[in-house]
Amino acid sequence: MSLAELICPAGTPAALRTAVDAGADAVYCGFQDATNARNFPGLNFTPEELEAAVAYAHARGTKVLLALNTYPPAGKVDLWRHAADTGARFGVDAFIVADMGVADYIARTHPGVRLHLSVQAAASSPEAIRYYVENFGVKRVVLPRILTIPEIRKIRQDIPCEIETFIFGNHGLMVEGRCSLTNYLTGQSTNMDGVCSPASDVEYIRDEATGEMSSCLNGFTIDRFGPEEKAGYPTICKGRYTAPHRPEGYYAFEEPVSLNLSRLLPELIDAGVHAFKIEGRQRSKAYVRSVVSSFRRAVDDIRAGRTANIEDLVALTEGQKQTQGAFETKKWR
Amino acid sequence: MTIDHGAVLPPRPPGAGAFARLAATLVQPILGRVVRRVAARHASLFARLGPHQGTDFVIDPVEFPFALHLRPDPKALLFRAVPRDALPVAGATIRGRFLMLLELLDSEEDGDAAFFSRDLEITGDTEAVVRLRNALDDVDGSIAEEAAAMFGPPGRAILGHLRRKYSDDAMPGGER
Amino acid sequence: MAVTDMEKLTLGPIAYHWSRDERRDFYARVADEAPVDEVYLGEVICSKRAPFHEADLPATIDRLERAGKTVIVSSLAEVMLARERKATADLAGMDSPEIELNNAAGLFAREKRPHRVGPFLNAYNEATIAWMAGQGATHVTLPVELPREAVNVAAKAARDLGLGVELQVFGRAPLAVSARCYHARAHGRTKDNCQFVCENDPDGMPLSTRDGDPILRVNGIQTQSESYVDLLPEIEEIGAMGVSHLRLMPQAVDMVEVAWAFRDVLDGACSAEEADSRLRAMCGSAGLSNGFYFGTAGYRRIEGAAPAL
């Protein structure tokens, strides 16, 4: 049976401490800049905060993974290099990377620090994964959320590195690292700036007469909700649009759902997954405490041979619906 | 706390007239002391607010006869109660039930969940609200408890009383 | 003022599911009439489409090469299924013509033999480009969202390493790819039983907001911009940066005329303003944008001279 490490999100120092205290095996975090894919206003760590966080985590036996998983535009690579140097100086346990230039720099300059391959690298075949393992010494790949359990089982046989999969949190639809939707509508880039449907361009417009609310991004209406409907954040790929034969407006890409694979934990561990990633650096301490402690209990139960019992976390998921996604069946495609 | 999916917020009590003004005036010294104490003990909060330190936030607990006006400028902290017919021009407004707002303050409730279930109404500058949420999330422990404890046992008792008074069970007609 | 005559015009790989006949006619006309230097063939978006036209590949290559065009065969952006991995490995085993790789699986199979790097491999910066050059890349196409300051640095770095550098200057911008097929989904199907409904939309399936504003296009697993990228007024500056190849993505407009608009400016036969109004007349309903290049929202069109870099 694999280690089944729990990899938990840390959006702020307080959230990091919460995750560590709730039983995380590792926490992942980023700096307050474009070097990571959750570059949200007021979130993330200053260098001083990261240094203190590493000390706190290590004192309690928890690892710290630094996300450097965006793509530096030409002329700005130094920001990512300095971030890597700072992380190495503080003793982070791994870097999570996507850009080949960043991976190459770290492999040459900080060969002692583990490299994990982010979903942002979109490596979904054994060949693509092996390219990163053989050229940069990647020790672990975070699989895109689109593989089924049989596919994970198969890939496990074909690759020489560890596997990490997402177990809970927001459902990524577009292939990570290949999405310019936000930049098209707002001018801020997911790949280069680490933002997605940024709050600075969000507006909720309420129609007082009808009680409807439109969620808009830089003036584009991404969705509209009736008075009794649950509102959503205007993430572009989770909006409703019309097509010539769909004039009523439909979820062209995906409905707002969230991944929750708790019931598949035993199978995933059996399939050879080494680590389970909980998504949510932009979520609150309440979320972190609740989700991490639930999965901690579940993993400990499974490893002790007991039946796992996961609390109902529906209320914490956007749109209040859950899915087990592609992991069970191919119908999702 | 249970979230009542799709609940429509109760109508605001009158926020005008002599009663509202009196209530706001009585509460004022307390609010001033609280915000200065929180600012002194949680400096990182302000760094996370960034340019929105100068933003005017209106926090509106719907059951109260007044709303709260917050400007988290470390050089000129402002936190006061305002009758609803005298609201400032707000950069961002957060409106919801008192208990919900209290739990959001202490990150006991997840802001996303509350908003997505329409228990919380956010208007204006979304980035300002995101910053405020992230700033509040980076605080260990409970700001509400900390504030109440400033006033000793009576403070804690009042906080407990407010929690009970504005709980779901106590709402007129029940919120189901 | 002469634009550097080193800039070549290329035709990118057809993104849509055009029928076998449509493709044959298209490439015959390109061979005979289009003033482009290089043509990319091959299937980039969906492996289910490839069987419809791959049998014609040798004949098309021959036709285009006899007409003096350089041919490059491009490859899938997303490689996951067994047939996709095999197709990628087969392509990587080709000695000629040149190949363009869009996925790290292709890089793995190519084993440092010469190849072109396509826009889906995310060559955003000089460090990645240097790495790729060391791995056998001879040519790189930059991501469509890269702003001009970054294009400038990336192009110089690539040229210093002896690489060709390409930038898309016309056509819908590729914005996202997915494992899910959004064409199938729009018709209540999945990728596995799609019945090739994407064939009905030779310029992408239009999506509008619920307010009725056209916003995006669906093309199978790909999401594209509603507007066509149009960098024709900027091609002199782009050439001066060191970009050697200008890519025209095939859209459902007269691509020969589109190519002539760009060629006439390159040759100094007409002004950029005049050529751009010809372009606008051809493509008006789609909207022409250049926001990415100018570091702003991609859907926007920035008019007027940009400050010197």
Image (tube, helix red, strand yellow):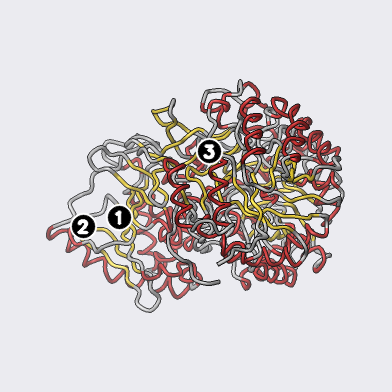
Q: Mark 3 lies on which chain?
A: C
Mark 3: few/some/many CA within 10 Å (<14, 14-19, 20+): few
Q: Residue at x 40, y 70 (%)?
A: B53
Image mark count: 3
Residue C236 pos. (x, y %): 57, 62
Mark 1: few/some/many CA within 10 Å (<14, 14-19, 20+): many
What label does residue B133 carry, if any?
Answer: none
Figure check: A224 above or below A195:
above
Q: In this view, does B43 lie to the left or right of C115?
A: left
Q: Is residue A15 visible to the viewer in this orientation of the structure?
A: no
Figure check: A192 above or below C83:
below
| Amino acid type, label 3 | Asp
Foreground tag (3 vs 2): 3
As measured in the structure, the alpha-carbon distance from the residue carrying label 3 to the one carrying label 2 is 62 Å
Q: Mark 2 lies on which chain?
A: B
Q: Which residue is drawn at 38% across and 53% down?
A: B101
Residue A133 pos. (x, y %): 83, 51
Q: Is residue C160 left or right of residue B107?
A: right
What label does residue C254 carry, if any?
Answer: 3
Q: Residue at x 38, y 55 (%)?
A: B160
As measured in the structure, the alpha-carbon distance from the residue carrying label 2 to the one carrying label 1 is 9 Å
SS label for mark 1: strand
**Residue marked by disc 2:** B84
| Amino acid type, label 2 | Arg
**Picture quarter with the C terminus of chain A:** top right
**Picture quarter with the N terminus of chain A:** top right
